[in-house]
Amino acid sequence: MKWKSKEQRLEYYRKWREKNRNKLKKYQREYYKRHHPECLSYIERYRKMNQKEDRARRIFYYHFNKGEIKKIELCQICGKKETEPHHFDYDKPLEVVWLCRSCHKYLHLGKTIYEILDIKANLYQSN
Ligand SMILES: [Zn+2]
Ligand SMILES: [Zn+2]
């Protein structure tokens, strides 16, 4: 196509974009999917993980409330009182470890048990 003026060309593009807005959106999505599969799958993974976590927690508390699971009163990492359950594997909803709030938090932040013990040891030393 030959353009009589720059304005004409811009106008043509503008109309084309307008007309193909949905197609473009779809194309962008496809492009994104193709070039950043890890991003999409991360979101997918995250969502699936949350669903699994919810499900595991529901099953756990159902059995816990029936008295089938015993609470361990001392944190299984540092030995502190007042524990809450933590799932290492959401596919095994009845298998939990009992952790104090702070160990639990560190674990969810991605710390390993050894790192948590280190952190705690340093905390106690500085007090
Ligand atoms: Zn602890
Ligand atoms: Zn947890």
Image (cartoon, helix red, strand yellow):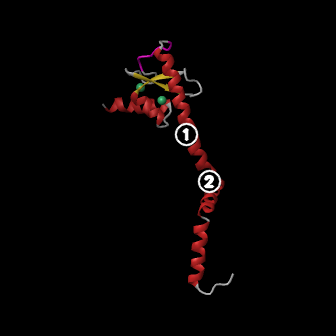
Residue 34 position, x and y percent, is 66, 54
Q: Foreground: 10 or 47?
A: 10
Q: Is residue 106 magenta?
A: no
Residue 48 position, x and y percent, is 57, 37
Amino acid carrying label 1: it is: Arg
Q: Quadrant of the C terminus?
A: top left
N-term-proximal mark, 1 vs 2: 2
Q: Is residue 21 left or right of residue 107?
A: right
Circles 1 and 2 in contact, beta carbons < 8 Å = no
Residue 75 position, x and y percent, is 43, 22
Q: Residue at x 53, y 31 (%)?
A: 53
The magenta segment: 68-74
Q: Foreground: 52 or 13?
A: 13
Outermost residue, left direction? 127
Q: Residue at x 44, y 34 (%)?
A: 106
Residue 83 position, x and y percent, is 41, 22
In the depicted structure, whether residue 37 falls above or below residue 3: above
> Callout 2: few (<14), some (14-19), or many (20+) C-alpha neighbours within 10 Å?
few
Q: Quadrant of the N terminus?
A: bottom right
Q: How many marks are shown on the rendered structure?
A: 2
Outermost residue, right direction? 1
C-alpha gap between disc 1 and disc 2: 17 Å
In the depicted structure, whether residue 23 falls above or below residue 4: above
Judging by the rendered image, the residue that carries numbered circle 2 is 36
Q: Main secondary structure of the magenta part?
A: loop
Label 1 sits on a secondary structure element that is helix
Residue 30 image label: none
Which of the 4 quarters of the picture holds residue 14?
bottom right
Judging by the rendered image, the residue that carries numbered circle 1 is 47
Q: Residue at x 55, y 23 (%)?
A: 93
